[in-house]
Image: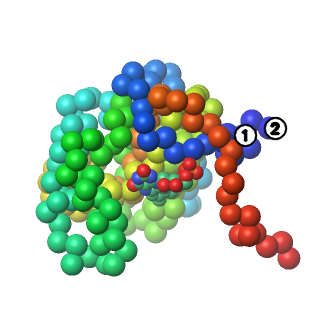
Amino acid sequence: MNQILENILSRRSVREYKSEQISKESLDQILLAGRYAASGKNKQPWKFIAVQDKKILNLVDKTLKQSILNIDSENTTEVISKYLNFLKPKAESSDDLFLGAPTLIIIAAQKDNYTSRDDCALAAGNMMLMATELNIGSCWLGMLPIFTEAPEIRNIFEALGIPENYDIYSSLALGYPTKDFKKIIDKKDDVIEII
Ligand SMILES: Cc1cc2nc3c(=O)[nH]c(=O)nc-3n(C[C@H](O)[C@H](O)[C@H](O)COP(=O)(O)O)c2cc1C
């Protein structure tokens, strides 16, 4: 099978990581794959912040957990409120929200740009595929974007170099998996129509 298709089909979300850090060379290749994603009008509106410093990862984890526990789910949309119900037990647990991954890539982009959300999703997809090629596990983590406006989260991200006019659209856990993760599974096959 051709290599790109094999990576696309066999990439699985990894939720258990070794503590060993990924190599600098691999991280650089993953970030390069993100930078070369297509973007609306080629604006490349993003910033990718790879966090590997354990103290910062712990701080983000702790702050995010507190934000999850403090947020009033009644004042959010039904969809977010459901997601928060799923997140609350995780926030109460001592396990870290980033699945123990040694690297977290935060994907932020300019708020006032119409295609930022799409651009970031595509960049994240590229990075997950590159990681798969390098036998590095990855998982998209959806909770950070919910708190992109929360002052306690913004304070941390501003210190990490995410400007005020940027929102966080995605974050990716990255690391060596505890077990082989590549597997081709069944996916919906009734989603295509060729007319
Ligand atoms: C937008 C988006 C948000 C996601 N959020 C989470 C998340 O917060 N936590 C998590 O463990 N997985 C998350 N995932 C991973 C999905 O659960 C996973 O892609 C899906 O179950 C399909 O499995 P696969 O990635 O192995 O094909 C997310 C994926 C996407 C695309």
Tell me, what colour scheme is on the image? rainbow
Residue found at x 57% / y 31%: 180
Amino acid of disc 2: Met
Question: The N terminus lies in which quarter of the figure?
Answer: top right
Residue at image location 68% in from the left, 44% down from the top = 184
Q: Nearer the viewer, residue 189 or 32?
A: 189
- The circle drawn on residue 54 is none
For marks 1 and 2, give the CA distance: 6 Å
Image coords of residue 112 (percent x, y): 37, 66
Tag 1 and tag 2, C-beta contact below 8 Å: yes
User: In what element is the residue under mark 1?
Assistant: helix
Query: Callout 2: 10 Å neighbours few (<14), some, many (20+)?
Result: few
Residue 6 visible in rendering: yes
- The one of 55 and 148 positioned closer to us in this rendering: 55
Q: Residue at x 67, y 58 (%)?
A: 187
Can you tell which quarter of the image residue 164 is in? bottom left
* Residue 3 locus on image (x, y percent): 74, 35
Q: Is residue 39 left or right of residue 99?
A: right
Q: Position of residue 108 (x, y in %)?
A: 37, 52
Read off the residue under disc 1: 6
Residue 54 image point, x, y percent: 25, 29
Q: Which residue is mark 2?
A: 1
Ligand 1 closer than 8 Å to label 1 CB:
no
For residue 193, which quarter of the picture? bottom right
Q: Given the image, on which type of amino acid does mark 1 rest?
A: Glu
Query: Local crowd at mark 1 within 10 Å, few (<14), some, or many (≥20)?
Result: some
Q: Is residue 164 visible?
A: no
